[in-house]
């Protein structure tokens, strides 16, 4: 059992050791991983996996914020270029070709920013989903054994007699 935080052993003034144990559950692992990548792995005692998922998740979230800001900025520049082009066209100015070139450039930049944002969003969603799968799958222990999770066993005998005879039901 993994002891952490308030579950860690405590010694009172008389030298008595008090231990509070809470069982790991697959649902608790899944909920923690859904909230923050790596939290479910840390809860299950898989510190290296927790660090990897937390680092990747926070990096992708930062990338998502940055690409969202770039997309918003590019959309604003595109709207400005559209207004300038419309103004040049309605006034019949000779700068219409220049405004058209600026509009095309702004559209290309906005399209690239949108594509990058979509790529980072998809990567973030994929990591989040895989993080939950990883936390739940490995919380069950090697070979599907539920280990400390308190989930139903992966292999159970039909009865004590069937267990002694080697008959088992696989879940």
Image: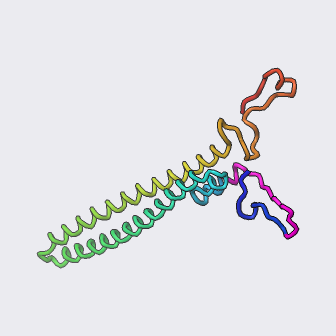
Left or right, residue 65 beside residue 26: left
Magenta region includes residue 30:
no
Left or right, residue 25 beside residue 67: right
The outermost residue toward the bottom is 91
The outermost residue toward the front is 15
Of 16 and 6, nearer the camera is: 16
Residue 102: image location, x then y, percent: 21, 69
Q: Is residue 95 above or below residue 43?
A: below
Residue 121: image location, x then y, percent: 45, 57
Magenta stretch secondary structure, dominant = loop
The outermost residue toward the left is 94
Residue 19: image location, x then y, percent: 81, 59
What is the span of residues highlighted in magenta in the rendered image? 13-29
Residue for point 50% across, 51% down: 126
Rendered image quadrant of residue 15 = bottom right
Residue for point 72% across, 42% down: 147
């Amino acid at each position: 059992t993994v002891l952490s935080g308030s579950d860690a052993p405590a010694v009172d003034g008389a030298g008595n050791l008090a231990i509070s144990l809470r069982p790991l559950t697959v649902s608790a692992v899944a909920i923690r991983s859904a909230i923050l990548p790596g939290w479910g792995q840390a809860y299950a005692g898989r510190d290296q996996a927790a660090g990897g998922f937390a680092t990747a998740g926070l990096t992708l979230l930062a990338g998502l914020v940055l690409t969202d800001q770039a997309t918003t900025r590019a959309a604003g520049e595109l709207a400005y270029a559209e207004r300038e082009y419309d103004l040049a066209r309605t006034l019949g100015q000779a700068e219409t070709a220049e405004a058209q070139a600026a509009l095309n450039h702004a559209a290309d930049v906005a399209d690239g920013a949108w594509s990058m944002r979509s790529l980072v969003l998809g990567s973030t969603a994929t990591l989040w989903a895989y993080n939950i799968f990883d936390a739940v799958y490995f919380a069950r222990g090697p070979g599907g054994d539920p280990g400390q999770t308190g989930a139903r066993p992966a292999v159970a005998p039909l009865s004590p007699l069937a267990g002694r005879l080697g008959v088992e039901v696989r879940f």
